[in-house]
Amino acid sequence: MRLSFGVLRSHFPPLVLALTLAAPASTAAAPGNHPTLEAGDACIQSAKSCDPLKVGASFPLNEELQAGEHGALIKLADGTTLDLIPGTVLRIQAAMPIPLGPGAPVKSQTMTLLTGKLQVDASPKNGTRRALLLRGPGKAQVILSGTAAISLRQDTLSAVNLSGKMLATTANDWNDIPTGKAFSLSKTKPKPQIRSILPAPKINGGRWVTTTMADAAEALTLHWSEVPHAGSYEIRLVSASGEVIRRASLGPQETSFHALGLAPGSYEFHISALDEGGLDGAAAPPVKLAVIDVGLPPGGFRSGPSAVQVAEGQTITLGHAEGVELAYDKATSYTPAGKGFVMRGDQVRLLRFRTPGATVDGLLRVEPRSLGVQVELSPRNARWPRDTITATIRLINRSGGVVPPDVKMVPTVTLGVTPLPITFQEESYGVLRASITPQPGQLPAALRIEVHDQHGIYLGRGFVEIAK
């Protein structure tokens, strides 16, 4: 195949990669339309520092942009996206017309990749043709209309055709690079060294759902099969909004990933094997992950690792559970998780969450609320007006578990059916004490103390018979 186009003249060093994203001149972005940092972190280099950019901010042309430790997602005016790995440095330059075959020249934007690696999505959008022109070592040139991963390492330019059309040449004799193929160009190998890309890793399951009540032992986990000849694995954890939350490069023998400390929400896990030249292989299908936000009703509390206590009839809300399946106790059938769970009866329930394909469930143990009180009234054989009664109330957990730190005991005192305005003093957390002096009224009578918490949930009671 032969394709004629004009020479892109520049003073770039021979091993600097020039990227040109092209669109028909009639639909090209206005000259003043600058690129934008969509996600991640990046800075603009100057002689003395690197000035940070804010997400959503645009930046000027002809400046060196450096991706930070989380990488950077750049969006150009025509919608083309550039996903830079950490440490990648590039310069986006002014638009210029370039003839790409028959017809009028295409008004294009030129970029210089100084170091690192990026993924480019220049696939057609809204009926508009987009193309990517790469200039590499010597006379090497590449045209892409689709998506690709591009790497510049030492003296070697490498790219992989992930989708669409790709052509490569060192003169005017163009080589068609099929989808799923990669190539490298260097000073010593000016002819494209075409090879197949690595296959996608096979995901073997893991725990893909957890809750905000889980402990460190219940991290999100993923496992995959080792890909022969892989030099590394590139993983990305992407939020529902498309932001890359975590990005990592793992060694060729590492076949698992663990994620702790994620905020409630839905996520996607992306993984591909990279060859020894750092080029992407086929990507595994994204895996849906979720961190369910467990909302407790008034008086509910976390009672242990992945365990909560709530009162009879109360509802636990389940946020970010879309697409998550739920099974109870030892059941083998799963149904959509829904938005809540109502506590019925006094039996412990085990909620087991998963997304399709997972081999380990995320767990939430729901226990009946076991908070109570011990009410001590002394002396037990009290007589009035002779004795003053000492009342002591102690907050306990009848199941032997933790006592949450924010429970307030609200006691009510009655003599027979008559309420008594008794003031209790807090001796320490979970301990109230009061002295009840002889009261007027018909004797014998029962002195009763009934205790609720600040939400009106019953905790317990005690009484003493008072003789005359």
Image: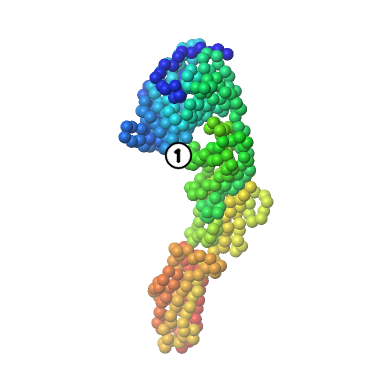
Q: Is residue 76 visible?
A: no
- Whether residue 332 sits left or right of residue 453 in the image: it is right
Among all residues in the image, which is located at the extreme left? 48
Q: Amino acid at mark 1?
A: His
Question: Local crowd at mark 1 within 10 Å, few (<14), some, or many (≥20)?
Answer: some
Where in the figure is residue 411, as x and y percent of width and height? Answer: 45, 71
Residue sitting at x 46%, y 31%: 116
Examine the image and state in which quarter residue 53 appears: top left
Residue 292, image x, y percentages: 53, 49
User: How many numbered dots are placed on residues in this image?
Assistant: 1
Asked if 90 appears above or below 338 in the picture, the reply is above
- Residue pictured at 50% horizontal, 57% vertical: 297
Residue matched to label 1: 70
State how the image is colored: rainbow
Going by the picture, which residue comes out furthest to the right? 332
**Residue visible at 52% across and 29% down in the picture:** 149
Depicted 13 relative to depicted 443: above or below = above
> Would you place residue 299 above or below residue 468 in this image?
above
State the residue in front, 195 or 225: 195
Q: Residue at left 40%, top 73%? A: 427
Residue 303 in the image: state x and y as whole percent: 52, 61
Kindly tell me whether residue 467 is visible in this rendering: yes
For the N terminus, the quadrant is top right
Q: Nearer the viewer, residue 83 or 13?
A: 13
The residue tagged with tag 1: helix, strand or loop?
strand
Q: Whole-percent x and y of residue 319?
A: 52, 48
Specify whether 91 is left or right of 290: left
